[in-house]
Image: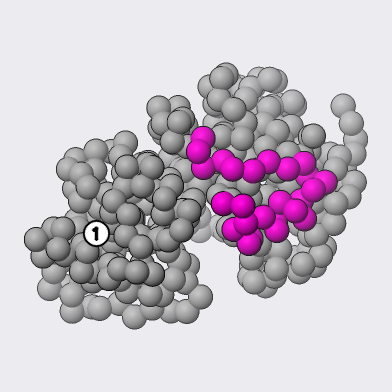
Amino acid sequence: METMMKALRLNAPNDLEYCDVPVPEPGLNEVLCKVESTSICGTDPHIIGGDFPGFWPKDFPLIPGHEWAGEVTELGQNADLYGWKKGDRVAGIANMGCGFCKNCMEGRWTICLNYGKDKIHNMYGHITPGAYAQYIRVSIKSIAKIPDDMDYNLAACMDPLSIALHMVERSGIQAGDDVLVNGSGAQGLMAIICCKSLGAGRIFVTGSGRRLEQAAKLGAIPINYREENIAEVIMNATGGLGVKRVMECSGTANGIRQSWDVIARGGCISTISLPKEEVPVPIRKLVLDEIDFHGNRANPNTLEKAIVLANQHRGDLEQLVTHEFTMADYKKAFEIFNGRLDNSLKVIVKPNK
């Protein structure tokens, strides 16, 4: 086993270095995995750019990257007792709760009360070394096995897919419900797939350009926000009632405000958006129309379900993986991803190629 590996190390904001670092050793309830594919997340450029000072990361240096898939190569203490073995093919996620606080015990470990305490809590690629590296040391709580015939590039998308699934499940969606997926980026497109899987009726989606075209290919009803009034389209289509569920993925203040314009009485707005500015909530509408407004952080207990869903919708999901680069070509990969160039959606980095 090698003692050194290649990694992308963030030394300071916007100082991402391709360099040699020690291969980590797995500890209690951990495994070491060879990283076959790492998908660039929309959060990664913000972490690299220093947009969350003192939070993500808490300090430097840090190896970013948290959407990944690979193979178990070494077992830490007790990992075998839980059924893990060398050669297991796995997908990983960012979060690992402490497992013992009240929130973790209730299954809500993405809002662990011991967040950020290094000895008992990890968040890979954010405050804990991540997957822009040839190997990653990871808790067995933050991985799940993937089918033998699932491509690693697709498996690297299980983190965002499981986040989309958490958002959709938290909306309380029922079979036949009309839905608006607000935003047609990767998370919006994955939300469409999740809504389809859970039996949604009509799925409307907002966006523009190539991404909106991709949403239509997935079976959603496209609304070009640059050319159409979203509220008018939705209300005309629903006889003035609005949609029962909104999945807010636009990430903008205007997108969040639009959600309130189209939500039906008794409906739910479920969001993963983190807009740059705070957005006022129309409390009178929330109360008088009994609107549920759910914020969703990451993917508690949805990774294994997302893998099953992905296996059933491989054709849809494979369309979202558009580019692949070696890790040495990371600058080009980030340029393509950040600039939304060449119709990019999910851009994959290959640490071991």
8 left or right, relative to 147: right
Where is residue 17, by image quadrant?
bottom right
User: Is residue 109 within the magenta segment?
Assistant: no
List the residue tagged with mark 1.
268
From which residue to which does the magenta span run? 318-343
Identify whether 51 is placed above or below 296: below
Identify whether 116 is placed above or below 203: below
Q: Residue at x 34, y 69 (%)?
A: 227
What residue type is disc 1 on?
Cys
Where is residue 231, by image quadrant?
bottom left
Where residue 323 appears, x then y in whole percent?
64, 43
User: Is residue 324 within the magenta segment?
Assistant: yes
From this viewpoint, is residue 93 visible?
no
41 left or right, relative to 167: right
Where residue 29 appears, x then y in whole percent?
64, 34
**Residue nearest the observer in this picture, 109 or 90:** 90
Where residue 107 appears, x then y in whole percent?
41, 45
Secondary element under disc 1, as helix, strand or loop, is strand
Main SS class of the magenta portion in the image: helix
227 left or right, relative to 77: left
Residue with the most extreme left position:
239
From this viewpoint, is residue 336 visible?
yes
